[in-house]
Amino acid sequence: MEGLARAEMAQWESERYQNDGHHSESQEEHAPFTLRLDGDALLALVDQLKNKLGAALILLGGELDGKITLVAGVTQNLTAQLKAGDLMKQAAAAVGGKGGGRPDMARGGGTEVAKLDEALALAKAYVEQTV
């Protein structure tokens, strides 16, 4: 039952993200907001967003119980330009942690909650320099 609740929460967050002005078909950049989801729910949300957006570089960050969880996703058509694991290493280091993963999906985190916005900004700069 807990897995179902997480999947439903990820679906709700995905719809909220797209319906609350965080997503636009004509925009490449989306407004950051902090999610109160665990890592598994963030993974599910990244998968849903990758499927809906088609071509996307996604980095989601969540704070739960005083820890930061980060999940990065890159659609297959963009992995030649940017690897999710490389993006994650940059973002996780900014919040005092570690991360890594596959070219299309990566996970990480840290303990410096106050630096989440900084991590997202650094990741954005990294993407702009890389792509």
Image (spheres, rainbow, N blue to C red):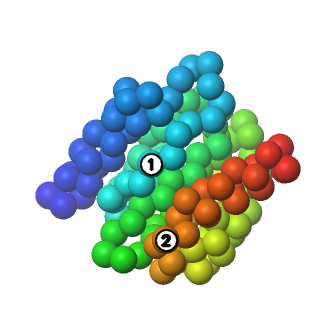
Evaluate whether residue 92 shows in this view: yes
Tell me if mark 1 has few (under 14), some (14-19) or many (20+) residues whose alpha carbon lies within 10 angstroms of its own.
Answer: few
Gap between marks 1 and 2 measured at Cα: 13 Å
Q: Which residue is mark 2?
A: 114
Quadrant location, the N terminus: bottom left
Q: Nearer the viewer, residue 107 or 119?
A: 119
Q: Which residue is mark 1?
A: 33
Residue 56 drawn above or below residue 116: above
Residue 10 drawn above or below residue 53: below
**Image point (34%, 35%), residue name:** 16
**Image point (44%, 28%), residue name:** 21
Q: Nearer the viewer, residue 84 or 60?
A: 60
Outermost residue toward the front?
A: 114
Q: SS for tag 1?
A: loop
**Image point (65%, 31%), residue name:** 28
The residue type indicated by label 2 comes to: Ala
